[in-house]
Image (cartoon, rainbow, N blue to C red):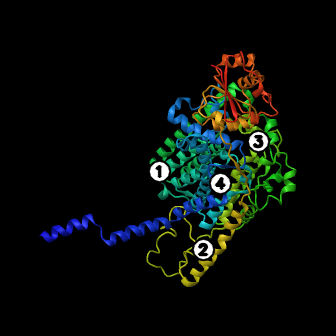
Amino acid sequence: MSEVREVVPAAVGHPGPGRGRAVAARLVGLARHEWSLAVFGSLLLAAVLTWPTLADLSGTIPQDTGDPTLQAWQVAWGGHALLTDPTQLWHSNTFWPEPYTYAYSDTLLGYAPFGMIGHGPVAAVVRYNLLYVLVHALAFVGAYALSRQLGAGRAGAAVAGASFAYAPWKLAQAGHLHVLSIGGIALALAMLARGHGWSLRHGYRPDRVRPGWAAGGWLVAAWQVSLGFGIGLPFAYALGLLCLGAAGGYGWSWWRRRRPAFPRRLLLADLAGGVFFAGVTLLMAAPYFEVVARHPAGRRTVEQIAMFSPPVRGFFTAPPESWLWGERHAVARATLGFAGEMTLLPGMVLIGLATAGLFLSAWRLRHRLALAAGVLVSAALAAGTTLFGDGDPGYVTLVEHVPGWDGVRTPGRLVLWTTLLLGILAAGALTVREPKPDPRADREPGADREPGADLEPGADLEPGAGRGTGVAADGRWRRWAGLVLVLPVLLVLAEGVNRTPHVPAPGQPAALHGLRGPALVLPSDGTREFHVMLWSTDGFPKVVNGLASFTPASQQEIRGASGGFPDAASVAYLRGIGVRTVVLLPAYAAGTPWADAAARPVDGLGIRRETVGDGLVYHLD
């Protein structure tokens, strides 16, 4: 008995080598799982294809120091506001004393959790650079997952993911994190399709319904909208149209008694998820409508949209940041009015593969035609006023009749939908159709199962899989086919290799450390305002400074009244509106009304001036 008592605790408390090997085998299996490899591979690709972003996270910024510094501030402000006072989220520390200033541009609010980590301008730059890399990885994973769920093979899905993440047109948007943040669109659609048991290959399969995935898809869709309406608003409308189409198709099939009743749990998941999505969208929209009501200049005009509307040749022209096409397309770019928003090449290889997918594809003919129609419609919308002018129907129809669409200034960014649909067409071309079972073939054990039944929903048979004869030859075919199918992925990725400049991040002047607000930083004009916004992440003092697509009347008035600072009139005015501190940065003042402000006397003004580093700090109280 004593021997038994000694052995049992040892067996329970100290697992034998067999259990350890089982755990190790599970971990190895998890690491080798398709989705683990897809995530790890997407991160590796993002690190390589955005290089040298990770080489200097705190010292440089991709593209330029304009919009990226604004967006670094946006992420930081979102995290700061949610941690300190969520009720003041939309009333940021910039553009003082105006309210709703966080809604002056796309907010990137969905990245606010990242903004809760770290403090100050350096942390904001590091945070921005990490997000810049991660959004490329998410775009790859999202499009890969969507294509796999629709029924594409791994190589086809990889092409879709690579093109969605690294299309040449995205290189022109390297300074616009909100435009690069499109991975949630594809991922939400993938999760919704999986939740509803639907794919292009098999249609609706009730046994594959997963309500939890559908609910998760709605959550991801809501998160995508929270990143900004420039990309999120068209997504919301596209999702609404897809829901209407799916409901209509299901209702027609149910009426003809070709389908069972809609699963109750899935219906509840859709209702709850749809309400949540609509609620988030409306809550996000409310501040923007308030801004337009207060500042009518913030509303986009047809003339502005026409200025950014690309010609058809823009869809075949790459930006200068493209390693492969940049120099080759220089002449074509020179003919574009606003090249930064008109170089919209999805990829020459992608266009070729998608064209092939119209004729040879795993997708049914009707699905190929639907995808092709989507490509044409999305490209026509991305062309803005180019194809149909300011008449109906056309892009202007949406501007004039669809709520919120007048806030979308740059129609060319809708090319993301063109790219996604081209990627799905290309994925079909690279996917081998499942062979039909031969009724004369000898039936193996388990042959009564549906082909692919042991695979994940949306999984695809690899080239040659499913054949019952010629096992050795079939294995060789799979190996050679795998090598051949890697080539399109590499070619698509080659078109995404960048020459994006990485410029030094603007260092915070010593005069702005511990700044006491409300404050005015001079000179107050131009893209330097973005730098002041970034520097204000050091404690987030209230500042008059800020830059948006329009200038608030109060800011214009303050700038005008401060042109002679420091003098009696400007000091009295600034004191009267509540400004406590003025910081002058002489190094940036050349060519502005404050070029000689450092030499202006302050005697008799009742203010105190001190030199801090290369700046001058004026205390008005």
Mark found first going from the N terminus, 4 or 1: 4
Q: Are marks 3 and 1 in contact (CB under 8 Å)?
A: no
Label number found at residue 463: 2
Number of residues whose C-alpha sits closer than 10 Å to that of mark 4, classed few (under 14), some (14–19) or many (20 or more) = many
Mark 2 crowdedness (10 Å alpha carbons): few <14, some 14-19, many ≥20:
many
- For the residue pair 515 and 185, the one nearer the viewer reads as 515
SS class, disc 4: helix
Which residue does the numbered mark 4 point to in the structure image? Answer: 53
In the image, what residue type sits under mark 4? Thr
**Crowd tier of the residue under label 3, counting other residues whose Cα lies within 10 Å: few below 14, some 14–19, many 20 or above:** many
Q: Give the CA separation, mark 4 to mark 1.
A: 36 Å
Residue furthest left as drawn: 1
Q: In the rendered view of the protein, which quadrant contains the N terminus?
A: bottom left
The crowding category of the residue bearing disc 1, from other C-alpha atoms within 10 Å (few below 14, some 14 to 19, many at least 20), is some
- Disc 1 target residue: 212
Establish if 333 lies above or below 517: below
User: Which residue in the protein does label 3 denote?
Assistant: 395
Mark 1, secondary structure of its residue: helix
* Cα distance in 3D space between marks 3 and 2: 43 Å
Q: Amino acid at mark 1?
A: Gly
Label 2 is placed on what type of residue? Pro
Q: CA distance from mark 4 to mark 3?
A: 36 Å
> How far apart are labels 2 and 4 at the CA level?
37 Å
- Kindly identify the residue that appears in the image at 42 percent across and 67 percent down: 26
SS for callout 2:
loop
Tell which tag, 4 or 1, sits nearer the viewer: 4
* First along the sequence among labels 3 and 1: 1
- Mark 2 and mark 1: Cα distance apart in space: 31 Å
